[in-house]
Image: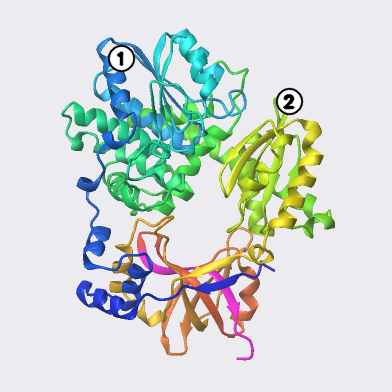
Amino acid sequence: MPIEKRWVVRAPGASEVVERLAAHLRMSPVLANLLVQRGIDTVEKANKFFNPQLGDLHDPFLMKDMDRAVERIERAVANNEMIMVYGDYDVDGTTAVALVYKFLRQIGHKNLVFYIPDRYNDGYGISVKGIDFAARKGVTLAIALDCGIKAVEKVVYAKEKGVDFIICDHHLPAEEIPAAVAVLDPKRNDCNYPFNELSGCGVGFKLVQAYAQKHGIPFKDIEHLLDLLVVSIASDIVPLTGENRILAYYGLERLNREPSSGLLSIIKICGLDRHNITIDDIVFKIGPRINAAGRMRMDENDENAAPSGGFAAVELLVEGNEKQARQFCDVIDNYNEDRKNIDRSVTQEAHDYIESHPEMKQMKSTVIYNPKWMKGIVGIVASRLIETYYRPTVVLTMSNGFVTGSARSVQGFDLYQAVESCSDLLENFGGHMYAAGLTMLPENVEAFTKRFNDYVEEHIDPQILVPQVDIDSELLFADITSQFHRQLNSFQPFGPGNAAPVFVSRSASAYSEPKLVGADMEHLRMDLVQREKPNVAIQTIAFQQPTHYEWIRGGRPVDVCYQIVENHYRGTVTTQLRIKDIKRVEGK
């Protein structure tokens, strides 16, 4: 049986405000209520929300050190210095590198190289290996993206090698800021930039925007880079509010209308070229393919292999020739297939181990270690285990003589503090409330496991261990008209800070025979009706919820909570409910 979830219906907005907005905007009170729940309680705010404007982007020079960063790039361009664009191996890092690299190439600078660290040999962030590579290539300026805010010693080492750094990061800084030429990070305490939730690629774009602004390059000439930026915004799960909403809105427009050759090849291989691409499509189809490259270990005996998987991703993203891009994309897609096979296998091994150790099943957290697992997929496996056991989870493996791993949390529990409580057992760690990475000596695994489990046992509220579904509003199926769905779509792009609304409908039952679908019959597809209007049937899909099949097949009622989506099938677009959870209505 799936984990029983707790449903929480949000408090409605003030009725007089909802009524005023509904009347002025000529929309359903249910949708007007969604606006008020999101803090959009005036017509002026609503107009800004529904009509994002590029003119509302902030002046990039409001970011601390931006003037210094632009001046150093100007000098490098004027003197034809070798510039290295350096970034992390995930989607945010690789899109950021591609964006800045493409812009420097666009302004005519050809003395360029990019570098993506190898997850297995370099580790995260700015590496000694990467700096040595720069020195060998004659690099005098490196632009680090989505990393570097804590690279104090590495920046000193680079300076000794004759390499200046500009750091563009969005992670929380430590007390000491690296002594780079410029450190762009809106989360710096001494930075007064008005919006501090940019992605790493977003900070890179602000650098590009600043350079373009100073040199009289029209904004329309850098808009083509927004397709890369929206992929980063969606994949890095940053809030889709403020500046991110504007950038994502126009990035999606670009991605759908005129994507770059590299992204177009991914779009085609995903089968997304036949319908409107959304944030969800990026999160579940485009992003994982780019990410997979950085997760895979390169064949060190293959002379033709890329220096890192992330390197291959950037090659794809900067490629201008569609035929060549397709060849790169095939490589990336193969990485993704390999990654899926490995993470399925490892997840199953982890499940089997937990199920065979009853004492682990009774705990409030999971720490599991296998030295044979691939480092690049342990974070995915941790997330998969949470789907089954729903508790803070750490998955560990062995890499380069150290035990390394990823931790993931559940809503409401500060994972970072739990990891930090074990800091004396760790070589290094980093992350935030819901995700962290950590490294330790093999002899500390047992002590870490006990300490982490004890900390969670002592500090977690048992109620947190019950998954919560936040519901925006109750809704009748009869209210889901084509106009309602069209107006709901105008709330997009959806994401953190502007989540796709979740509705609940009561006492629904099957209109026709429900079906189990999927390779393992793991999904439940059905048409549902409500007693109020039994002739209004709506198509639904409930992923990973086959246990309700017999109940619904027997004509018995259920309450369902869901999101309203578009279903694309063989060229036909229909409205569909993507069911998040089902509760059986007993005694009826």
Q: Which residue is located at x 81 percent, y 40 percent? A: 446
Q: Is residue 584 magenta?
A: yes
Q: Residues within 10 Å of mark 2 (few under 14, many from 20)?
A: few
Q: Which residue is located at x 62 percent, y 74 percent? A: 549
The one nearer the camera, 369 or 65, is 65
The one nearer the camera, 43 or 512, is 43
Say what amino acid the circle numbered 2 marks. Answer: Gly
Q: Is residue 179 visible?
A: yes
Magenta part of the chain: 573-588
Q: Is residue 408 visible?
A: no
The tag on residue 401 is: 2
Secondary structure, mark 2, is loop
Q: Which residue is mark 1?
A: 76
- Picture quadrant of residue 398: top right
Image check: 65 left or right of 126? left
Q: CA distance from mark 2 to mark 1?
A: 40 Å
In this rendering, the answer to whether 562 lies above or below 352 is: below
Q: Which residue is located at x 55 percent, y 35 percent? A: 335
Where residue 493 sits: x, y (%)?
Answer: 35, 55
In this rendering, the answer to whether 125 lies above or below 301 is: below
Say what amino acid the circle numbered 1 marks. Answer: Ala
User: What secondary structure characterizes most of the magenta part?
Assistant: strand
Q: Is residue 460 magenta?
A: no
Q: Earlier in the sequence, mark 2 or mark 1?
A: 1
